[in-house]
Image (tube, rainbow, N blue to C red):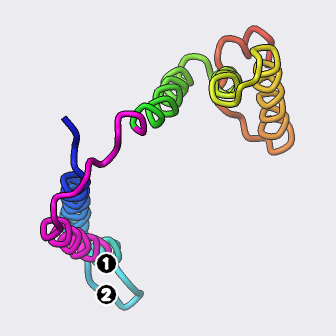
Amino acid sequence: MAVSRRSLEIGTAAALGAFAAAVIAGSLQLETGWAPTGPQSGYVPLRLGVLLLVVSLLLLVQAARSAPSEPFATREQLGRCLALLVPTLAMVVAMAWLGVYVTSAVYLAFMAHRHGGLRWSRAAALGIAAAVLCFLTFELWFGVPLAKGPVEAWLGL
């Protein structure tokens, strides 16, 4: 069962409308006027929320008026998207336990092997080199510590 492009456009317009409604509701809890010192805290969010709501309504009308169209994506196209999405989500989840450097090295090595066609030895070397370069750049040169995991603790970093 394929999802049509029209259905997804209607769903996207509805999601944008819901987000706009949340922005408007949040800004109405604040002062939305103009004070002698300038705009109050809810002034800009209210106007942006209203603009987003107008845009979402225009998108919804445009999508509803369009003729039913072809499927949004073929099975092959969705497979290619998932081949990138699933490893990326796994990396994001693993960062909580393994830290940034180890997960980025593993992710880059996997992607270089899977999608770049590199042998595992070269892909692993690339991942490790990139992680070391990121460590040097952020930790030593910029002085911005990123999340570390058990491997970095074991190495005393």
Q: Residue at x 20, y 53 (%)?
A: 11
Name above or below for residue 55 compared with residue 118: below
Q: Main secondary structure of the magenta part?
A: helix
Magenta region, residue range: 48-77
Percent of width and height locating residue 134: 78, 35
Q: What element carries label 2?
A: strand
Q: Residue at x 50, y 23 (%)?
A: 90
Kindly indicate the quadrant of the structure image that contains residue 15.
Answer: bottom left
Give the foreground label among 1 and 2: 1
Q: What residue did someone put label 2 on?
A: 34
Query: Is residue 75 a member of the stretch shown in magenta?
Result: yes
From where the camera sits, is residue 63 visible? yes
Percent of width and height locating residue 23: 26, 63
Percent of width and height locating residue 43: 31, 78
Amino acid beneath label 1:
Tyr
Q: What residue did someone put label 1 on?
A: 43
Kindly indicate the quadrant of the structure image that contains residue 26.
Answer: bottom left
Query: Is residue 31 a member of the stretch shown in magenta?
Result: no
Q: How far apart are marks 1 and 2 (CA)?
A: 7 Å
The residue nearer to you, when weighing 35 against 91, is 91
The residue nearer to you, when weighing 137 against 116, is 116
Q: Which residue is drawn at 63% across and 23% down?
A: 114
Amino acid beneath label 2:
Trp
**Residue farthest toward the top in the current orientation of the protein:** 154
- Image quadrant holding the C terminus, namely top right
User: Mark 1 or 2 closer to N-term?
Assistant: 2
- Crowding around mark 2 (Cα neighbors within 10 Å: few <14, some 14 to 19, many 20+) is few
Q: Is mark 1 on a helix, strand or loop?
A: helix
Name above or below for residue 152 compared with residue 56: above
**Residue farthest toward the bottom in the current orientation of the protein:** 36
Q: Which residue is drawn at 26% across and 83% down?
A: 33
Q: Locate residue 138 relative to residue 51 in the image: left or right.
A: right
